[in-house]
Every structure is written in C-alpha cells, then in structure tokens.
Amino acid sequence: MPSKTPEIKIVEDITQLNREAANEFLRSAQASIVSRGRFCVALAGGSTPGGVYSLLAEDQSNPEKRLPWEKVFVFFGDERHVPPDDPESNYRMAKESLLSKIPIPQQNVFRVASELDANTAASQYEQQLLNFFRVAREEWPQFDLIMLGMGPDGHTASLFPGSPALEETHRKVVANWVEKFQSFRITFTFPVLNHAAEVMFLVSGEGKAEVLKQVLRNPAKDVYPCQKVQPEAGRLLWIVDRAAAKLL
Ligand code: 6PG
C-alpha cells in the first residue's frame, strides 16, 4: 500500500500541541457536522491527549468554539482491561477531562465494556460499531476523526510490537494480549484506523524522538506499529512538539 506523505506540524511545546490538536478537533467536527450532520470521533488514550480534552471543555465557554454535542458521537480507539472507574481507564480519563464537562447525551458516548471478559468486551464493542455505522461484517466503519498517540516502542492504540492484533485484517475490534503488561487490551484494528477520513497523531516529549524519526523517516519499513497507520483515502496528520521532533 503506497504510503501517503503525512502532514507533520511541529509545535513549540505541549501547550501549543494541546491548542493545535483542539483546533483540529473543532475544525473536523464543524466540517463533518456541516457536510454529514454528525461527527464520529474515536479518542486516544494515555496521558498526552488529556490536555487536549480539557482545552476542548474550556473552549465550550466560547460561543465561536461551541459544538452541538448532540451531533457528536464519541468512541475509544482502545481501552485497558480494567473497570471504567479504574485510574488506568481511558474512559475515566476522557470523562474527567471532557465528557463530564460538556452537554453530550449519554447515548452518544460509546464506552468499551472493559469490566467484562476481554474477548466479550471486544466482540460487544465491534457489534456496537457495526450497528452504529450500519455496516455489514465485511465492510468498514468510517470515522471522521481518529485520535492516536504513539508509545516509545512505536505502538499506537493498543497495537503493540509483536502482539497478535498486528496481523488482524477482518475484525474491527479485538482483545489483544500485551506481553509486557501481562494483560489484555481492547483495541481497534489497523483496517479501522486506515478507513478513517482523518487520523491525528499527538506526540510529545524527547523520549519519543528516536522512534518518531524511525516512523516518519522510514515509513516503508513497517518495523513499528505506527508505520502501518496509512489511511487509504484519509488525511494523516502528526502534531508533534519540538522535543519529540528534535531528530527529524
Ligand atoms: C493507551 C493509548 C496508547 C497511547 C500511547 C502514548 O491506551 O495508552 O491508546 O496508544 O496513545 O501509549 O501514550 P502517552 O500519551 O501516555 O505517551
């Protein structure tokens, strides 16, 4: 699959990254709502996006940035195999930083039932995707925006190096055993990521500089999971701070 040249925005620091990412979220949301009457977004987990979500919540006090949240549908690109109130939960992080601060209808937020057996949670989430997007099992849901982070090992979502889910080409959501954590994660598969209208990576910090250089400078190598995120027809945007970009 020819790798499209990704757009790379290098910003000064995490504060600017948050602002840039929040602006891109708002732009994508407004454009999707105008053209399709709704905005379907999958949030990233981890620590980086928390500041973006908090800024989005603050933005809602500005009428020019306020979104019609009843037209916004929120999913999660991956989730840890923990209950939703666990400190490790991506849902809990998003709820505390954004979802509890905006007037989004509860039925518009699709949480992974991560308190269940991992395979059951993945199958249920996959069925929710099929139902919501009204696609058959052999078709692919198309998100307007999927937000992703990158780990220092080049993983994204919960697609970790050497893990079984890297090879999945039929399922939309799987329970992926992550050896280094000795636990399951529930994650979107690469085809879901690659069918998005837009994928936005958020990367901050010097600790990711070496892998980011490998990922962005040798995209054909497919060494790191991030390198397999190549939207077939969508936009691929990287917003990275200067510390993470220092080797580019
Ligand atoms: C997760 C994320 C994961 C994350 C990266 C980067 O559940 O942890 O989905 O893919 O985006 O690990 O995490 P940081 O933003 O904390 O560096």
Image (cartoon, rainbow, N blue to C red):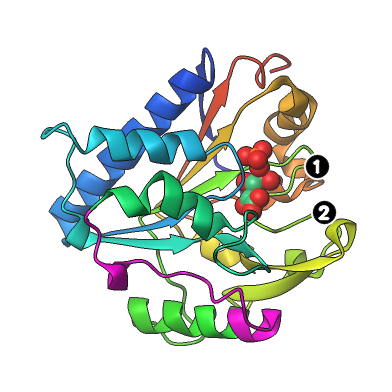
Q: Is residue 114 magenta?
A: yes
Amino acid, disc 2: Pro
Magenta part mainly helix, strand or loop?
loop
- Which mark, by number, is residue 14? none
Q: Residue at x 70, y 39 (%)?
A: 219
Picture layout, residue 75 above or below residue 12 = below
Residue 146 counted in the magenta span: no
Instruction: Look at mark 2 in the image and give the residue it sits on.
Output: 161
Count of residue discs: 2
Q: Is residue 38 something one can see in this rendering?
A: no
Res 206 visible: yes
Identify the image quadrant of residue 114. bottom right
Give the residue type at disc 1: Asp
2 or 1: tag closer to the N-terminus: 1
At mark 2, the secondary structure is loop
The residue indicated by pointer 1 is 153
- The residue drawn where x is 30% and y is 69% is 106
Between 193 and 4, the one nearer to me in the picture: 193
In what quadrant of the picture does the N terminus appear? bottom right
Q: Quadrant of the C terminus?
A: top right
| Whole-percent x, y for residue 151 in the image | 72, 41
CA–CA distance between discs 2 and 1?
7 Å
Determine if the C-beta at disc 2 is less than 8 A from ligand 1: no
Residue 204 appears at what percent x and percent y? Answer: 62, 27
Which residue lies at the image location 39% right of the left edge and 82% below the top edge?
Answer: 135
Q: Which region of the structure is painted magenta?
A: 103-121
- Disc 1 crowd rating (10 Å Cα; few below 14, some 14-19, many 20+) is some
Mark 2 surroundings: few (<14), some (14-19) or many (≥20) residues within 10 A? some
Q: Are marks 2 and 1 in contact (CB under 8 Å)?
A: yes
